[in-house]
Image (tube, rainbow, N blue to C red):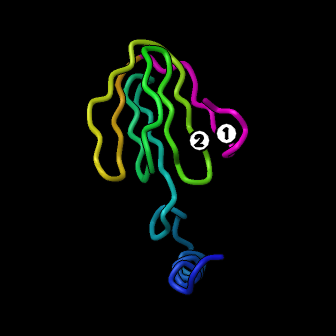
Amino acid sequence: MPGWKSRLKQSATEFLKLPPDALLEVSRVTCVDGKNVVVENARRLLKVEDTKVTLDLGEQILTIHGQDFEIILVTDKEVHVTGQVASLEYTAHGRGAL
């Protein structure tokens, strides 16, 4: 159950009509020209392969499919990936995304 701080942020976001990523701890995925992907608020980098990168976003798993993937930057909450992106797949935890 969310704490009072989470509920306050949620209420402020709704009241001010802000996008959910403005105050809340939600993930943001930016894909530029099908070659560069930036994932903000990623919890963990789960798997890196030449054709697939899998990240834990908290309530979902993100799998980036394509080829020639390289991880360029990893910080506490951000991952930068380059390569040829074919698709992005979101899977709820516990549904066999790996």
The span picked out in magenta is: 84-98
Q: Nearer the viewer, residue 97 or 23?
A: 97
Does 88 sit above or below residue 60? above
Locate the C terminus and report the quarter of the image it occupies: top right
Q: CA distance from mark 1 to mark 2?
A: 5 Å
Does 85 sit above or below residue 18? above
Tell me if mark 2 has few (under 14), some (14-19) or many (20+) residues whose alpha carbon lies within 10 angstroms of its own: many
Please tell me the numbered disc located at residue 81: none
Residue 39 at x, y percent in the picture: 42, 43
* Residue shown at the point (35%, 47%) measured from the top left: 78
Secondary structure of the magenta portion, mostly?
strand
* Residue shown at the point (45%, 50%) measured from the top left: 43
The answer to whether residue 23 is magenta is: no
Q: Nearer the viewer, residue 63 or 33?
A: 63
Residue beneath label 2, please? Answer: 61
Q: Is residue 64 left or right of residue 35?
A: right
Q: Is residue 21 left or right of residue 3?
A: left
* Tags 1 and 2 touching, CB below 8 Å: yes
Q: Amino acid at mark 2?
A: Ile
Q: Amino acid at mark 1?
A: Thr
Tell me if mark 1 has few (under 14), some (14-19) or many (20+) residues whose alpha carbon lies within 10 angstroms of its own: some
Residue 63 at x, y percent in the picture: 56, 31
Locate the N terminus and report the quarter of the image it occupies: bottom right
Residue beneath label 1, please? Answer: 91
Residue 83 at x, y percent in the picture: 38, 19
Of callouts 1 and 2, which one flags the residue occurring earlier in the amino acid sequence?
Answer: 2
* Residue shown at the point (42%, 14%) measured from the top left: 50
Identify the image quadrant of residue 4: bottom right
Secondary element at tag 2: strand
